[in-house]
Image (tube, rainbow, N blue to C red):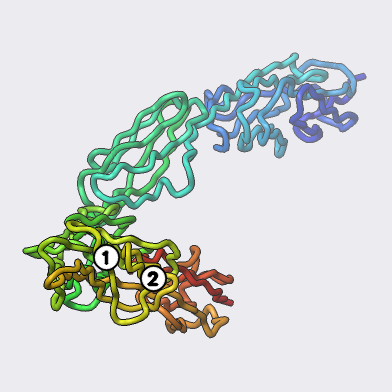
Amino acid sequence: MKRSVLLIATIFVVCATIIFSCVKTNVPAPAGSCINITRSSAAGTDSQMVVVNDPITPITYAVTANISTDTSATDTIHVSVFGSLPTGVTASFSGGVLVISGTPTTGIGSPFTYTVTTTGNSCSTTTIKGSIIVTTCATINLSSAAGTNAQNVTVNTAITPIQYTLGGGGTGATAAGMPTGVTGSFSGGVYTITGTPTVISATPYSYTVTTVGGACTSTATGTIKVNAVTCATIGLTSAAGTNAQTVTVNTAITPIQYTTAGGVTNATAAGLPTGVTGAFSGSLFTLTGTPTIVSATPYTYTVTTVGGACTPTATGTIKVNAATGLSTCATATVSYAGPYCLNTSAAEPPTLLGTTGGTYTASPAGLTISGASGAVTPSTSTTGTYTVSYTIAGTPNCVSQTRVIISPIPAAIISYAGPYSSTNAVAQAVTLTGTHGGTFSSSAGLTINAVTGAVTPSTSTIGTYTVTYTIAAAGGCSVQTAQTTVTIE
């Protein structure tokens, strides 16, 4: 008596794990039939190559019943997939078709080889093999500092090197769209863009780096904006005419002040009279002092900026005349190196050329002076300008005169009415009591005018700042400072 056999197309389940077998039994099928399995997808689908994260072309196998003289009973039927499938790829069965499909998420373990086998009540023991090779694209990632792939540089200034690290089988790279003077090179898995742009661009250069090698290429993009040179600047900010002064010897000049910008970090001055010097603070360069040597013609000075581009200069003149209304002596001349600051406690002697043995006197009253040596003591004197007379007894007496200046000690007190709201866009003035003409500075984050001391809260960072008011050395007195705090909240 003939027993029914199992029709696989209606009863089995397929699993997609390494070395497995799915079984379904005891379901009637037409007598005299057996099971067969064949590939039904296009040729080559069972030996394909794909890139990781790209879906495979589905691989299908048809399961059919065939007439057979097999007289076995309702035997158990096995349809098995041995080997491995990529992560993300699975097998499923529906309507008599076994389907292998999905998207590989990794290439680790490639190539993946599998075997589909039917045993039991099949027309014959059927084995079908296939393979899936999963490859990876070359990768490229910025490895230099964030923002180096979007630079703004000045023409003829080297860019900050831009580096990309390659992976996934990348063996090199090429770049297109870069400024003239900028090139790329590959070494040790890293593609580096370096150079000095020589052509200005109205809009940024947009470049593309394309990998070489690997299963497929990848790209990275960036921009390099090449700007024209911005020159440093210097301009007179003290009163008009202060850069063309005429003064009497041993008399302090009116301070001459220049404001700089455009990356200037310092300044120097050449051609100044002896006794006159320059000092840089913040963005200001200030000339101060007391000329001690008479000049038949004006001293022509030049202030030259340091830092920034183009190195601009400013010029001016200082004419130093001899003192008027002073007596002279043919046999002796006397002078002092002053002016002297009131806080100078040491006795300051004169320079005497010629006959010695004379006596010294001063007018008006208020200057502490030795009648024998002519040495003056600033700290016990009163501030002011004095005429010193050196007298050699005779008939008549020979008198040589000069002037001595005792300068007051610079001092100032500064304060602000704050705290100020960070939304306040109005510049807030400083209250200054004492010596004027100094410069203001603060730690980073506070918007402050170096000349006026005014602060702008809306463009400052919230916080409490120490503001320093600096009075340049002048009149024989050293640099003096005053400080206060201001809060932006």
- For label 2, the SS is strand
For this view, does 350 lie left or right of residue 424?
left
Q: Quadrant of residue 89?
A: top right
Q: Which residue is mark 1?
A: 287
**Quarter containing the C terminus:** bottom right
| Depicted 341 relative to depicted 66: above or below | below
Residue 112, position as x, y percentages in the image: 64, 22
Q: Residues within 10 Å of mark 1 (few under 14, many from 20)?
A: many
- For label 1, the SS is strand
Residue 348, position as x, y percentages in the image: 36, 62
| Depicted 349 relative to depicted 220: above or below | below
Residue closest to the far right = 1
For this view, does 193 lie left or right of residue 94?
left
Q: Is residue 472 in sight in this rendering? A: no
Please tell me which residue lies in front, 65 or 292.
292
Residue at 48% from the left image edge and 67% from the top image edge: 442
| Depicted 63 relative to depicted 270: above or below | above
Q: Which residue is mark 2?
A: 439
Judged by depth in the image, the label closer to the viewer, 1 or 2, is 1
Residue 231, position as x, y percentages in the image: 23, 58
Please tell me which residue lies in front, 429 or 389.
389
Residue at 21% from the left image edge and 44% from the top image edge: 198
- Residues at marks 1 and 2 touching, judged by CB atoms closer than 8 Å: no
